[in-house]
Image (cartoon, rainbow, N blue to C red):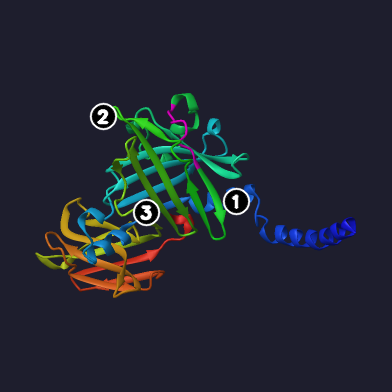
Amino acid sequence: MKMRTLIIVTAVLVPVFQAFAQKHKPKYSLQQDLDTMMVWFTGEFDNFLQVWMEKRDSAKPELIHEHIHSIFAPVQVPAFGKHVFYVKQYMDGNPKKIYRQRLYSFGIDAAEQAIRLDIYSFPVDSLYYDAHLQPEKLYRLIPQELTTTPGCGVFWKRYGDHFIGYMKPKACSVVSKRTGKRIYITDSLKLTRHAIWIRDEAEDEDGNYVFGHKGKIPHKLKRVAYYSAWMVVQNPLQQNQYYTMRNLRLHNQGDKVRFVTEKGEPTKYWLELAEVVYGKDLNVLKLAIYEEGKSEAIAYTWGTPDAKRLGINMRSLQAGVTLLDSTQK
């Protein structure tokens, strides 16, 4: 009787377990996840909109995020594997205000059943600025020439329409040269097709704050789109004479360029392209002209965030932008 009961129970439960396993099995293989992630990770990202909204909404100064721009450019460096990226991150919309430059190497970690990111630092940062534009600088590098910190690898797993990045608890640490205390560093990340969220934070061995957003809110960077821009300015001394700038490049997350004449003389005008929010939730793409010394735009126009073309005509000042396709960026 017991044997018969066991057979009946087994016959009932096995199909249930099989159905559960089928329903919850991974939708993609790790290799497929890696291939997808490499596409989503490639590009430039910026949190201009996040910072703009915090300032607009009068957030507490200590809770306003730094304005950061991240470039993740795939490069060929054979000694580091197949999936390698040059990384440049800068502040305040200024490409020269670099705060981090790295080489990233991605691969599959079978034991963790995740994608693993190993991070390498250059021995002399200044020798590798914008190395993605001069890939020969990187091609022959080997791991022994760069530095990496054990335990500071980042693991990534896919959950539907996004990837989550994480570090092992207290695995990444360094000793502070200033205090002599051990500092524990944690990265928490989220990657989608159109954005990357980054939350870096650290505390010392006594649990004291070292760095990171005090509200524990990640930097929310949106993928940038580049536009070709032009601008025309009337000569104030000769109304029938105009100065023209063409073939400018602006991205849509708060990028700004100064108008310079054909002779290389800077004028008092700036052109800005930015995604902003009107009211509570109306996202728009704004093209604006600023005059030196004035915080408010002297003219602007706007369209949908995915607008392919915008233009302004003030007679004496004219400007326009056209969305570039991926092959023109």
Q: How far apart are marks 3 and 1 (CA)?
A: 23 Å
Q: Is residue 2 left or right of residue 318?
A: right
Residue lying at the far left of the rendered structure: 237
Pointers 1 and 2 in contact (C-beta within 8 Å): no
Tell me the quarter of the picture where residue 195 sits.
bottom left
Residue lying at the far top of the rendered structure: 144
- The earlier-in-sequence mark between 1 and 2 is 1
Q: What element does badge 1 sit on?
A: helix
Pointers 3 and 2 in contact (C-beta within 8 Å): no
Q: Which of 312 and 119 is in front in this view?
A: 119
Residue lying at the far front of the rendered structure: 1
> Few, some or many C-alpha atoms within 10 Å of disc 1 (few <14, some 14-19, many ≥20)?
some
**Amino acid type of the residue tagged 2 in the rendering:** Thr
Residue at left 44%, top 50%?
189
Q: Can residue 86 be seen in this view?
A: yes
Q: Name the residue under label 1.
A: 33
Q: What element does badge 3 sit on?
A: loop
